[in-house]
Amino acid sequence: MTTGAIWAVIAGMAVANFAIRFPSLAILSRKELPEWARRWLSFIPVSAMATLVAGGVLRPDGDWMVSVADPYLWAAIGTGAFYWRFRSFIGATVTGVILFLALRAVLG
Amino acid sequence: MPTTDSKQAACPPRRARFTRGLKLGLPIFLGYVPVGAAFGVVAREVGFTPFQAIVCSATALAGAGQLIALQLIGAGASVAAVIVTTAVVNLRYVLFGAAMSPHVSRVRLPGQAFLAFTLTDETFAVNIDDHRRSLADGYSMAGVGTIAWTGWVLGTAIGAVAAGFIGDPTRFGVQFAMPAMFTALLVAQAEDRRHVITACVAAVLAVAFMLTLPDPWYLIAAPMLAATAATVVTR
């Protein structure tokens, strides 16, 4: 890709990302949403995080998990358990990465 | 983010609230630096200059979307294909923006623009969690966004400038930094039985959609359907 094309990608991504993020936040914040809509939106965070975890753990880099002896799976379980017990976001993230490295060394 | 809430007379000053947000977002910063560095390293490999890599991170703040863009560029995709694909990857932010909207109704438009610009999976989850505890406001959310942006851009700069020294970033386990953050944030969101069940439904739907829909539509289809099911069941 040429330098000009890379700049076009950078500009396009910047515009597209803002155009995706801004309108729903700005427009809906000025409206009184019905109760069902507020309830629906309240379930979006947990649903979205579960979806991201499923994709990131079960199919990292586009390759499906092929065995239960999978470092992504067990490191994620360890990360979740750490957060559940200690309620530390940074502690869970660091523990998760260390656990992942250790499991990858053991399990391959 | 200026607000007109009369209760703020009893609140800490704006600077203290912003600083609180910076502290709240520190774990995001620490997670973003290595992943941003990985982006910087790969960006150099596909032909970005260090300056282009840094500008890309500073203006897009698109995480996985940026990494996918690099894959596509490396595979010879067109400019339009790269932009459209990354936009689809990030379509979930329409939902996130909508979910944030009730919490930013007192924030002025420029402030809302900044919060939208810094809206990522992690800033979203941290701010929603903070709102649930009735602690968040525009300034604290701006602090979370600022520290997250700084981590992502700093990490990119480190990776792009020191690509030759870093080598393959996966040997440091950076590919698990994002899943680890998502997992911790998922547990943080699962506040009661309804949310745990909704999370399980979303995960099952995600797998089903990954198998049946073209990528990356599962990212938006699974949360929407799971939230709809939860809304209907809890009516």
Image: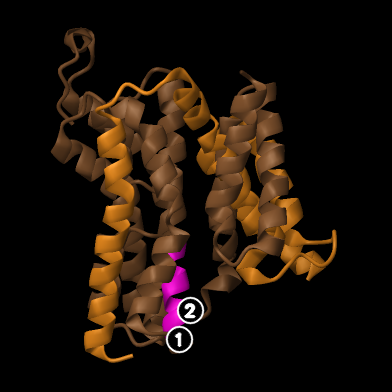
Please state which amino acid type lies under the numbered disc 2. Answer: Gln
Residue B63 spot, x, y in % from top left: 42, 60
Q: Which corner quadrant holds the N terminus of chain B?
A: top left
Q: State the CA–CA distance, disc 1 to disc 2.
A: 5 Å
Residue A44 spot, x, y in % from top left: 52, 36
The answer to whether residue B114 is left or right of residue B73 is left
Q: Name which residue lies at 59% across and 53% down.
A: B179
Residue at disc 1, secondary structure? helix
Please state which amino acid type lies under the numbered disc 1. Answer: Gly
Q: Name which residue lies at 59% across and 56% down.
A: B218
**Magenta region includes residue B165:** no
Q: Is residue A14 above or below residue B186?
A: below
Magenta residues (range): B64-74
How many neighbours does mark 1 have within 10 angstroms: few (below 14), some (14-19), or many (20 or more)?
some
* Residue B10 image label: none
Q: Check disc 1 and report the residue beneath it.
A: B74
- Which chain does the orange colour mark? A
Toward which corner of the image does residue B200 lie, by quadrant? top right
- Which chain does the brown colour mark? B
B109 or A23, nearer to the observer: A23
Q: Check disc 2 and report the residue beneath it.
A: B71
The answer to whether residue A54 is left or right of residue B119 is right
Residue B129 spot, x, y in % from top left: 47, 29
Q: Is residue A77 above or below residue B189?
A: below
Q: Which corner quadrant holds the C terminus of chain B?
A: top right
Whether residues under marks 1 and 2 lie with C-beta atoms below 8 angstroms apart, the answer is yes
Q: Is residue A89 above or below residue A5?
A: above
Q: Name which residue lies at 37% across and 85% down.
A: B78
**Magenta region includes residue B66:** yes
Toward which corner of the image does residue B105 lie, by quadrant? top left
Please determine if labels 1 and 2 lie on a single subunit: yes
